[in-house]
Amino acid sequence: MRVLGIETSCDETGVALYDTEQGLLGHVLHSQVPMHAEYGGVVPELASRDHVRKVVPLARKLLADSGVTLDSIDGVAYTAGPGLVGALLVGAAVGRSLAFALGVPAVAVNHMEGHLLAPMLESDPPEFPFVALLVSGGHTQLVQVEGVGRYRMLGQSLDDAAGEAFDKTAKLIGLGYPGGPALARAAERGDVSRFRFPRPMTDRPGLDFSFSGLKTFALNTIHQHRDDPNAGADVAAAFQLAVVETLAIKCRRALQQTGLTRLVVAGGVSANVHLRERLERLAEDQGGRVYYPRPELCTDNGAMIAYAGALRLQAGQHEPLSFTARPRWPMDELSPL
Amino acid sequence: MKLIALETATEACSAALYSDGETLERYSVQPRGHADLILGMVDELLSEAGLRLRELDALAFGRGPGAFTGVRIAVGVIQGLAFGADLPVVPVSTLQALAQGAFREQGHGRVLAAIDARMGEVYWGAFTEGPSGLLEPAGEEGVFRPEAVPLPTGSDWFGAGSGWNTYPKVLARHPGRDILHDGERLPRARDIAALAIPMIERGEGLPAEKALPVYLRDQVVRKPA
């Protein structure tokens, strides 16, 4: 079965082709990040306006690059949530209608399930069951995964997502938007031992996260050292360490609590080198292993949507002749395959 | 000539199928129901006419102005249909379709179309009857504060659209002139289809990715200082 996947939930337009026999045939991405950077954050209306200009041109490029014709597509998958409602509706409208025109089934895919299953696209995929840490600009979640569609939410952020905290703190240091990756670079120049940031919510049981306090801590620290040109880099280093340590502590707890050994890490922040090193050390200590998607599939992309959609279409799932955007769509509401 | 037209820019959702002189239409006023309804309407019209999508000559759509998300529903659906069935697309002004409806049903040949644009503004356009029996633009469309709309000179104008419901007095502000209006009138797909036919005949069909909205309101965010 050959499936075209469309992702438009936030500020990246992604289109991909996945074939259940041949694997990933291709994926293309257009990032709106530079467009939103001028405004210091994602502007939902501008995101929708850009998606509607990009989906079909990207799909044409994908087909041309991978030498595939539209007639050979057996199904269409699109992200229906969670995400920005107007942005989601663009991909849903195009995807559902394209399937109708081709006379093939369509399936609405949960964006978080897409991230969670993305490591399955690699040559050495994890086996079920595993614990997944989904960590991006929009989400921080720990999920127990027994199989496709069998998800138990173990914990999530009560306020800012980890990636959001990275971006906001970067802005405070004066690194612009989105400054997450810039903050990670600045941290390399910083003295990690100079400041000690708290590890939020690690002093009590449970697997929930809270990152908004770190940003306030960073703000106060910068204020106290505003005449020190090195303070920014030192704050970046201490902040990054605090986030990495907090995530690692919760991951260790999640593995211990579930008795599982495999840890899957996906989402934009999973590209962070320090986080990867730390989680690999942790998994080794626990006698387990960490699995990641390749870097370009860590951030939002169409490939994970095509893949998750293919699994669901193969299981006979498909949408009626209508489409919906679900800005909030908890993963534990998904049906098991 | 066979075509399907969609209009989803206001609280009305409609689809029309024009086939060699006959028009079939589905129309429903259901705010926020457009994504649920529109493809089902298309499917029903094709079944009723005994046609397949690929047997059509073109697709037409209301390109706005109107509710941003509403306009993008028609645009997204048209892009998907046109891409999948390899059909040309024709964008038609939602304001012009609104005016055309007032002409078709009530015989008004000089229409001031106004759609409530929220935020204290209206989408505005003036249309007059042309030689082809269709209304044609008599000036540029725009988004205006109601007291600033460019009211054309002359008499016998008729007002159509939700803008007239929200600002009846302000829009008809010229002293000594009482502009009759129908503030309940909504744009319909059958008028999108009628306006699209000559465009298709002139070979103005575009590829799927050129099916794009016309928002008129382009300042949607302020840049930080």
Image (cartoon, coloured by chain):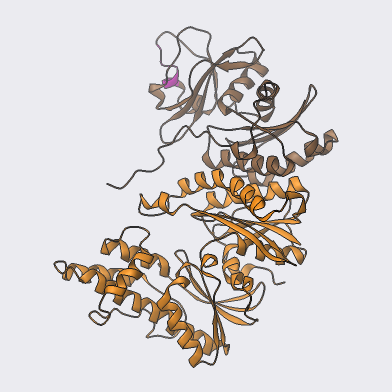
Chain colours: A orange, B brown
In the rendered view of the protein, which quadrant contains the N terminus of chain A?
bottom right
Residue A322 in view of the camera = no
* A68 relative to A1, above or below: above
Q: Could you say where residue A156 lies in the image, as x and y percent from the top left?
A: 48, 73
Q: Check the picture and name the quadrant holding the C terminus of chain A.
A: bottom right
Residue at image x 39%, y 10%?
B175
Q: Residue at x 42, y 49 (%)?
A: A35
Q: Is residue B111 above or below residue A210?
A: above
Please report the bounds of the magenta region as a residue range: B169-174
Residue A8 seen anywhere in this rendered image of the structure: yes
Q: Is residue A317 left or right of residue B151?
A: right
- Tell me: B134 left or right of B145: right
Residue in front for this viewpoint, A330 or A198? A198
Q: For residue A285: magenta? A: no
Q: Where on the picture, by quarter, is residue B94?
A: top right
> Looking at the image, which residue is at 77% across and 54% down?
A72
| Nearest to the observer: residue A198 or residue B98 | A198
At a point 78% along the width and 49% down the height, the residue shown is: A103
Residue B3 or B12: which is nearer the viewer? B3
